[in-house]
Structure formats: C-alpha cells, structure tokens
Amino acid sequence: MPANPAIKQVSEVAWEIPTSYKPGMQVPARLYASKKLLDSMDSGVIEQVTNVACLPGIVRYAYAMADAHWGYGFPIGGVAAFDPEKGVISPGGIGFDINCGMRLIRTNLSFSEVKPKIKELVDLIFDLVPAGVGVKGSQNFGQSQMGDITSLGVKWCAENDLAWEDDPQHVEEGGFIKGADITKVSRQALSRGTSQFGTLGSGNHYLEIQVVDPERHLDRDLAKEFGIVHDDQVMVMIHCGSRGFGHQVCTDYLRVFESGMKRFGIEVRDRDLACVPFSSKEGQDYYAAMVCAANFAFVNRQIIVNRVRDAFSGVFHRDAEALDMHLIYDVCHNVAKVETHTYDGTKAKVLVHRKGATRSFGPGNPDVPAPYRKIGQPVIIGGSMETGSYLLVGTQKAMTETFGSTAHGSGRTMSRTAAKREVRGSELQRKMLDRGIYVKAATMDGLAEEAGMAYKDISEVVETMDRAGISKKVAALRPVGNIKG
Amino acid sequence: MGYRFLPDVALADIAFEAESSSTDGLFETCALAITDIMVDPKTLRSTTERKLSLESENLDRLLYDFMTELIVMKDVDSLLFGEFKVTVSPGGTSLTAVLRGEQIDRVRHRLRNDVKAVTMHLFGIRREGIAWKTTVVLDI
C-alpha cells in the first residue's frame, strides 16, 4: 500500500487515522503494525476500518491489528466496541464462521518420540477427524439435543462424558457463552449443524502437530505455567469454527438486518456492514443465535480434541491422561461479547466485536481462568502451515488500549486464486516433507491455497503485538505434521 | 458469457464474476461456478435430480437464496450438482430449477474447496448492454 498521508504514527507500532479522513466517522481508526507490515497492508483495510468507525454507537476507536487484511464489511483482524444501549451489532463484525477459534493441547511427548510415528499419527487423525467438502462428523447428536448443546457448550460435553473435568475451565468463557436461545436459530442452520460435530472443515482450517521451538522464542518461566517444560515438547493446535451452523446463522440474519436497517434508518457504506441496534429485537435475536453458534464451535473443537486424544493413545499405547494431553486453552477469534471495560475514565459494559482478533485479557482479570489469572489469558496465534505459530499471554495494556484484544494469525497477502497460480499442491506437499513437515490434505488445490507465501510473516505480526504491549510472547511452535481441510 | 475468478478480490475467500444474456443463464452460470469451486465438474455424474422452487423479494435476493440453497444441499444431503436448468419468473421474484448431480464420493470426485456462505460483499445483479452480470464473493 502506498504511504497514506492520513495515517499518523503515534508510537513505534501504532498508527491513527483521524475522523476527518471520511465523512461520518464517529471515532478515529487505530492500526497496529510495524512499518513493514503497514507498507504491505492492502488498501482495503484502511477503507474498511474507517467504514467501521462510522457505525452508530462505536466507542474510542475502530481497530485493525497487525494481521489485518481485506474482509467483507469489517477487515479481518478488526476490533470494535459499541455502547450496548446506543450502539449496533453487526454480523459483518463477527464473520460468517462464528467462533472460529484456536485450541492448543499439550502432550508430555518429546519430538524424538513422535518423529518416527508422525506419518502413522497424522494418517490416523486424518481418518478420525473428517475434513473437506461436505463431510459428516462421527458424532451426530440429533436436533432434539441441539438446544442443550448450544446453550451449555463444553459444559454439556463434560456432563455427557465428552470432555475431561478440567476441559471447560480451559476454554474462553468456561466453555459456553451465556445468552443462547435455540428458538432464534433457523431450521436450515440446525439441519446443516447436526451432522457436522467433530469436523474440521476446509479453507484455512487445520489440525497441526507442533514442537516447541526455543530457537525462535521460549520464555521458560511463563511456558512452565502452561505445562510446557521441555524444549522439544509436542503440542497439538486446532483451528476451526462453527461449520455450516454458524454460516447459516450469519446468512439468515444478514437478511433480517437488511430490512431492519431500513426500519431504524441506518445507512452503511457496505452491505456487509449490515447492523441494527443491539438493544432492538432483531439485535437481541441475532445475539442469541450467534451465541448458539459460538457454543456449537466450542463443542465442535471438543469432539475433535477427543478424537485427537484417541489417536495419540492408539499410536503411543498410553492413555491420553498418561500423555498429559490437557487443554492449554481455547480462544474465539470471531465473536461479539458483552464485556466490562474501563475507557475514557469510566467502567462500563460494551459489546466488543472481534473479527479475526483474539481476546487478550491481562493478569488479575476475573474472566481469566484461575490457573492463569496471575499471568494473563493464553492467546493462541496460528500461522501458516509452513511457518509455525505462537502462544502468548494477554496484558494489562491490552485492557486499557484495545478492549483486551490482540491479533489472531498471520493474515493473508495473496488471494486463494493467485496462490494456486504460484504453486501446485503436490509440489508444496513434497517440499514441506523435505523440510520435516508431513502434510495430509483433503484436497491438493486447498493445500496450494494455504502455502506460506500467501501469508504475512507470523513472527513480524507477533513481534509487533508484543512490542505494542497488548500481548506477550510465551513460546514459538513449529509444525511437524499437518492436516489440512 | 460464463464466469471468471477474480484473483484480486477477497484474499481469504473466493470471488467470481458471471455474465449471461438472460437471467436464467446468469443463475445457471453462478451455480456452475460454485460447483467448480467445490469439485472438478468433470468428475461429477448426473445420477440424481432435484427440483427446486424459490420465491424472494427481488432478483438480487432470488440469486442469493438460490446459491445459498446449493450450499445447504451440499451440507445437509451431501449433494453436488453439475447440470442446472433454471427458469426465473418475468418479475424476477421466483424461480423453478431442475438440478442434476450426485452424492459426494470422496474416492471418485476430485474435491476442492468447501463453500460455506454467499456474502453480500460487492453482490448485486447489473445490466450491461445485453448482458446480465454479477459479482459474487463466497465464504470459504
């Protein structure tokens, strides 16, 4: 992106666009980026984040994180908080894949133990966790149970022997967001969802076997708090969301909101910014349906974790408990939640939209689970399948500066169509194997689209957020086995 | 007439532009583009037939709902279609369609991307000369 004179640097890695940039901006826009990331950021981010700044009831700033890229409506990597009485709720600020998120599970295995069995392990997980176009899950609960599942999330799993006792407390919001109402979800969404529990999906969703990478970064003291105690410890990372269920909820309510906007006299600069007052019936109905989808996603990732535990247990001939396969954490990165924050000197409830952005609550926050409260909430940032990922923790500065939010991943720099022109899936698979990453993909086209070259440098993104002080690096993780949806 | 993918739109998803000399043809072209994103159409047989009737408030919304219906049938019934015969009503608010395809076969079909939703981004049907055109961004 050419230098934009409207963007003013306010610190080494923070930039602002004043309200004078565009008619209708209620608040300035704030971007987190190194100079290198800012220069490579697509111009759509600037247009979209300043469109978000025009929405009714937005408070403080419209934010774009270091991984921001062109989305629809909001940029991906966007954060916006709204006054719950005067402000709006927008499906475009959450994304179609409601509660797309990340899970990180530890093991007590070292890479030297896993390396000889990586192919067997990845192949088995590929069989147990369906991925790709139109797949069905192994666990079909039926529509009569959907009310309980989508109300109670991982808590329901724990009550039905589908989660370990300590799993729910290691999931954002304790494994379920309050406020679900299944009667606000359409028949089509229910039909799409009931058969998809335990499926990975496709696109940028993946399941990865990773190894702690002290050469890139390891804060041993902090890592110990998460049970990361040796340098080549094996971890499992899962990236997926609410599947067809969440997408249908978003589709359904975009229609409701388009007609709702006329009734409320709201005009937006982009149809994907459709929004209604959060306090309206339409707004409350969408929130209740969106929460159902968010809880669906928590359960989807839980079922996948159960299959992963089964696979490790089968390959290494030990119980998953003996392999210490505890959940480190599960974070949402496509969601809106009512949270209490202090801003402009006042403590108040706000509706925080995070679209491709992660909650990053700091030490001492009562919403951070007890085991992590003294160090801050774990933040899981997934990179491309070639470049690795990071575990971080939230900070107090995030609470004061970004409504407790940080980045979520690398962020794309190249479209899927363009990536496929650059590399063939089979060639990429072979090259990755040469570099010690065994990949099993549902489709070769899908693999090519996820090549590392299509993404920003994850380390640059993480370093930027660390330097900004709104999340703090704990450990770098490098991929050794990958299942690509 | 036909469709072309747009490499510079929607980095994380897939966008295409479709055009036809008729609204029936535009709907059929959009359906073919969606199938092409999900599966190599050459590997798809026409062993199953579905009939579809839809009503919507306007032509834009009718196309949006038609494409969404294809995505729903993929998820709920595991069906992919490669042949489409669409008849849009003169007022552009309803259609009937005959779809031919088959259930997903992971061995025989060369599967591609899972399309999960039609977005409203850049969406809208426009008339350019004798052609009906639209831009569609699909969530992947």
Image (cartoon, coloured by chain):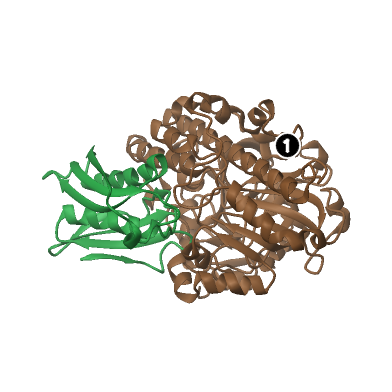
Is residue A56 among what the camera can see? no
Q: Chain of mark 1?
A: A
What's the residue at 82%, 47% (across, down)? A375
- Residue A102 seen from this side: yes
Label 1 is placed on what type of residue?
Asp
For the point 76% across and 31% down, which residue is it?
A165
- Using residue A449 as the reference point, say whether residue A38 is left or right of it: right
Q: Position of residue A21 (x, y in %)?
A: 47, 61
Foreground pick, B57 / A262 = B57
How many residues crowd mark 1 within 10 Å: few (<14), some (14–19), many (20+)? many
Q: Secondary structure at mark 1?
A: loop
Which residue matches tag 1?
A167
Q: Position of residue A9 (x, y in %)?
A: 63, 67
Residue A353 position, x and y percent, is: 56, 44
Which color is chain B depicted in? Answer: green
Q: Residue at x 62, y 56 (%)?
A: A123
Q: Is residue A164 above or below residue A463?
A: above
Quarter occupied by residue B52: top left
Instruction: Using residue A458 as the reference point, say whether residue B89 is left or right of it.
Output: left
Q: Position of residue B116 (x, y in %)?
A: 43, 49
The hue used for chain A is brown
Q: Is residue A301 above or below residue A427?
A: above
